[in-house]
Every structure is written in structure tokens, then in C-alpha cells.
Amino acid sequence: MTVPACPKCQSEYTYHDGDLMICPECAHEWKEGEQVEQTATILDANGNALADGDTVSVIKDLKIKGSSSVVKVGTKVKNIRLLPDAADGHNIDCKITGIGAMKLKSEFVKKA
């Protein structure tokens, strides 16, 4: 019997735990045969749909809270990760060269 891939992140490392299927990579739990709920689409400043792994460009200078550093206009951010359940509006998780890991709001980026 083959174990199905995770419907959320497509990981092949899923496993059974009682009557649930569990993905160790994204922590998604579901019952086998259950439909995955549709999540809201995250859009950039121009209205283009974003996806995990996309490359985006910053459209305005962004001050970094608690620092004197600034993310400059035109900075390219590669391999973004979307956070659809972000309550504070910072729905993109990324690493910016020279700055490090941070979260961005999708309204301040455009798809590259």
C-alpha cells in the first residue's frame, strides 16, 4: 500500500497515525480521502498570484523594525514561502541577502 503525498506541500514523507495522515514537513493532518480546503490566494502589489518558491522584488524602501537598516527598492527576494494564516499581515517568509530572515507584506512586493 502506498502512502499518498501531502495535499498541502506535496511532501512524499507522509505517514499514518491512527486514522489520520500526517506530513512531518508542514505539520498538515488530514483523513485519507478528505478534500483539502481551498486557501485564500495571496496577491502581490500588481494583483498577480504568488506561490511558494517565487522570486519577488520590493517596490518601496522598507525600514526594518528595531534596526537602522533598510530594504531598498528593487531588492530581489528569491524562494519566498507564503504564510496564508498570518494574523499581522506579514504573509511572506523569506531570507534577504545581507539582512537575513524576515517577513514581508505582499502589498510591498511584485512578482519578478
Image (cartoon, rainbow, N blue to C red):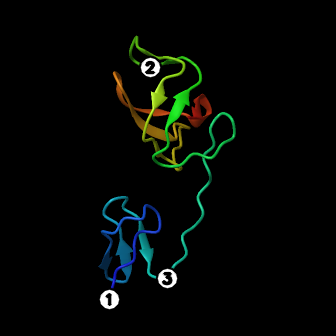
Q: Quadrant of residue 16?
A: bottom left
Q: Label 1: few (<14), some or many (≥20) within 10 Å?
A: few
Compared to residue 65, the image places residue 48 above or below, namely below
List the residue tagged with mark 1.
Answer: 1
Residue in the picture at 69% in, 35% down: 46
Q: Position of residue 7 (x, y in %)?
A: 47, 68
Q: Label 3: few (<14), some or many (≥20) within 10 Å?
A: few
Quadrant containing the C terminus in the rendered view = top right
Quadrant containing the N terminus in the rendered view = bottom left
Compared to residue 78, the image places residue 82 above or below, namely below
Residue in the picture at 33% in, 21% down: 98
Badge 3 or badge 1: first in the primary sequence: 1
The three-letter code of the residue at mark 2 reads: Ile
Compared to residue 40, the image places residue 80 above or below, namely above
Q: Which mark is residue 64?
A: 2
Q: Secondary structure at mark 1?
A: loop
List the residue tagged with mark 3.
Answer: 33
Q: Position of residue 32 (x, y in %)?
A: 44, 81
CA separation, marks 3 and 1? 15 Å
From the viewer's perspective, is the residue at label 3 or at label 1 nearer? 1
Residue in the picture at 30% in, 63% down: 24
The three-letter code of the residue at mark 3 reads: Gly
Residue in the picture at 52% in, 34% down: 56
In the image, taking residue 16 as reference, residue 80 lies left or right, namely right
CA separation, marks 2 and 1? 50 Å
Q: Position of residue 95 (x, y in %)?
A: 37, 33
CA separation, marks 2 and 3? 44 Å
